[in-house]
């Protein structure tokens, strides 16, 4: 039995082996970050709430698959994106995307993971927490948005290994965002890429086009 499996009892009373995680290939559960409101939701319409029924003030998750790339998505011009996959509290394979200044913050975390410790780490080695922080445009004080500020803790090695084994057996991706036109800045070894000979790869971890101060982030809720 693999690390991501469990023994359960079938409807007929027989022991069977099942996966702990729930996943339809190419169709992960979609979490979204709305940088206009600084809130998180599921599928664009269901707010993510805390135990008291209020919108969460921060969102914590453990990535096990990710990619940083540039593409034209959601009827928008080409721009950089981060797409991260994780397991939520209901054991569902889930995804969340970031762009604009929030993506710049995430790239800063990636640099720290590479350079700060005795050995280089990746986003798959940590548990991330993103906390929205309201910013106001210097050029136009009437415009504001919420940037996602990231912090992290080291993940348990057993969980990292379990998730890596799952990703090795099940292609993890989001079908409606996976295009051959993507230009990749970086991606995890666990990401299910399209045909390797058609994927353009670009740049070092620290190189991204400068984000728009407001427009890129403010529109992030469309994902």
Image (spheres, rainbow, N blue to C red):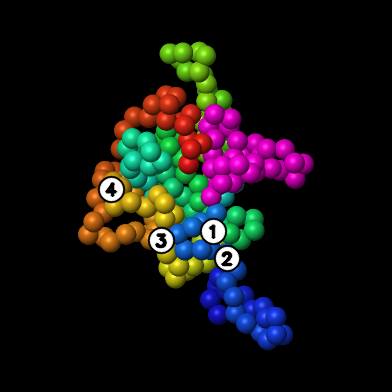
Residues rendered magenta in the picture: 30-59
Mark 2 crowd level (few <14, some 14–19, many ≥20, 10 Å Cα): some
Return the residue at label 1.
93
| First along the sequence among labels 1 and 4 | 1
| First along the sequence among labels 1 and 2 | 2
Task: State how far apart marks 3 and 1 are (Cα).
Answer: 14 Å
Tell me whether circle 1 and circle 2 mark residues in contact (CB < 8 Å). yes
**What quarter of the picture does the N terminus occupy?**
bottom right
| First along the sequence among labels 3 and 1 | 1
Q: Is residue 52 magenta-colored?
A: yes
Tell me whether circle 3 and circle 4 mark residues in contact (CB < 8 Å). no
Vertically, is 121 above or below 77? below
Task: State how far apart marks 1 and 2 are (Cα).
Answer: 7 Å
Residue at 26% in and 43% down: 203
**Front: mark 1 or 4:** 4
Vertically, is 65 above or below 80? below
């Amino acid at each position: 039995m693999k690390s991501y499996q469990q023994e359960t009892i079938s409807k007929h009373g027989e022991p069977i082996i099942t996966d702990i995680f729930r996943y339809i290939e190419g169709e992960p559960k979609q979490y979204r970050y709305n940088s206009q409101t600084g809130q998180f939701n599921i599928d664009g319409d269901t707010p993510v709430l805390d135990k008291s029924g209020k919108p969460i003030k921060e969102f914590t998750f453990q990535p096990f698959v990710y990619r940083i790339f540039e593409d034209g998505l959601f009827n928008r011009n080409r721009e950089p994106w981060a797409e991260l996959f994780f397991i939520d509290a209901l054991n569902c394979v889930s995804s969340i995307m970031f762009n604009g200044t929030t993506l710049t913050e995430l790239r800063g975390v990636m640099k720290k993971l590479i350079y700060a410790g005795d050995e280089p780490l990746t986003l798959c080695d940590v548990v991330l927490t993103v906390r929205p922080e309201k910013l106001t445009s210097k050029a136009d004080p009437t415009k504001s948005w919420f940037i996602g500020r990231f912090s992290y803790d080291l993940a348990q090695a057993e969980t990292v290994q379990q998730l890596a084994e799952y990703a090795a057996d099940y292609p993890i991706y989001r079908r409606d965002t996976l295009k051959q036109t993507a230009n990749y800045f970086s991606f995890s070894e666990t990401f299910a890429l399209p045909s390797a000979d058609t994927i353009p790869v670009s740049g070092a971890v620290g190189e991204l086009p400068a984000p728009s101060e407001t427009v890129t982030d403010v529109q992030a809720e469309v994902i």
